[in-house]
Each structure stands twice: as C-alpha cells, then as structure tokens.
Amino acid sequence: MSKATLVLGSAMLIVGFAAGTAFAKKNPTTPDLCVGKSAKDAAAALLTKAREYAGDGSWENIAVARVYYLTGQKDEGERILQATATKKNDPSDWIRVGRVYYEAGEWAKAQKAFENVLKAKPNDADWAAEIGGYYLVKGDRERAEELFKRSLASDSENMRNNLKMAGAYLGLAPHE
C-alpha cells in the first residue's frame, strides 16, 4: 500500500468520523421529546429518533424493527425487517430477524430465517448451537441434536454454546 493511499484512507476515516459525530451532536435526543408525553407519543418520537440514528446499519434497523414488531406495529416492523435482511442477505442479519420472529411466537417465520443462516454458515458453531436450542425448545429434538453435533464438531470447548444447549434441554430458549 502506498503512502499516498494510506494518507488518503486515514483522511477519509477522520472526515467520516467527524461528520458522524457532528450529526449526532446536532440531533441529540432530549428529554422534551418524551418526558411528560403520553406513552404512545413518547414511544413514537423515540422510535423516529432511533430510526434516524440507525441510518443504513443492518443490526440497528433490525433492533428498531423489533420494537415495532413486538409492540403490535407488525406491518412497519415487517417492512423494516425484510428491507434490512434482504439488502445484504447476511447470516448475522438473518439470525437477528429469526430471534425477533421467535420472540413474537412466530416459529414458522423464525425457522425460515434460521435456515437462511444455516445455509450460509452450515458449520458455524455458535449459530448451530443457538438455532439447535430453538428447535429443541419447540420440540424438534432430532433437528436440534443434528445442529448440536455440528456445533460441537466445530468448537467442542465453548462455554456459551454449552449453556445454550443445556438450557434448551431444560426448556429455556437461547439468549444472546
């Protein structure tokens, strides 16, 4: 890498950071946005601000969608989830989407998202353990143990994955 390329790259990074910092300082969330307002109005204002802060970030937008989805504003939540997860089609986005659906009690949708993860990263120990945990809690021990075997084949000394699997055998859904 040439010195000029390194200098240009560093300058671009500094400018980008400064612009992001300036944006955040110009648009802070202040108490008057929510304090003393009805719960509905306060939440709407804070969600609008959260969407502004999320920008193009995938996990950030999935987090915003989760609040919409789980608080009865499913149409808006679904729109954000689909727009975000299909934009990059990244397994880390699909695992987050699957968690939202699971939390909402929509197992068929969660399964579809989880299977997207497993197609993209079939030997990822962490995701195999987590997704296997969801399957076990939902009563599909055969599929769960298939995924547990994958997880253990990739990483047999992972405390967190052991906890995900142990919890699932006791009826506790994985927690991230």
Image (cartoon, rainbow, N blue to C red):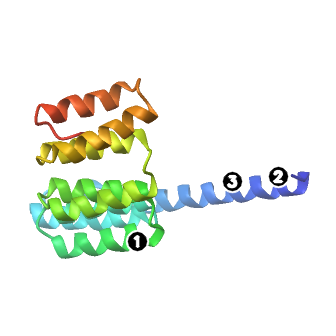
Q: Residue at x 47, y 62 (%)?
A: 26
Q: Position of residue 126 (x, y in %)?
A: 38, 39
Q: Which residue is mark 2?
A: 6
Q: Position of residue 30 (x, y in %)?
A: 31, 56
Nearer-N-terminus badge (2/1)? 2
Nearer-N-terminus badge (3/1)? 3
User: Could you say which disc has been placed on residue 14 in the image?
Assistant: 3
**Three-letter amino acid code at the position of disc 3:** Ile
Q: Describe residue 23's horizontal placement relative to residue 76 as left or right.
A: right
**Mark 3 or 1, closer to the camera:** 1
Q: Which residue is mark 1?
A: 86
Q: Describe residue 162's horizontal placement relative to residue 1 as left or right.
A: left
Residue 63 appearing in the image: no
**Three-letter amino acid code at the position of disc 1:** Thr
User: Could you say which disc has been placed on residue 173 in the image?
Assistant: none
Q: Residue at x 16, y 71 (%)?
A: 74
- The image quadrant of residue 148 is top left
Q: Are marks 2 and 1 in contact (CB under 8 Å)?
A: no
**Three-letter amino acid code at the position of disc 2:** Leu
Q: CA distance from mark 3 to mark 2?
A: 12 Å
Q: Describe residue 59's horizontal placement relative to residue 11 as left or right.
A: left
- The image quadrant of residue 37 is bottom left
Q: Describe residue 129's horizontal placement relative to residue 75 as left or right.
A: right
Q: Position of residue 140 (x, y in %)?
A: 15, 48
Looking at the picture, tell me which residue is in the foreground, 14 or 27.
14
Nearer-N-terminus badge (3/2)? 2
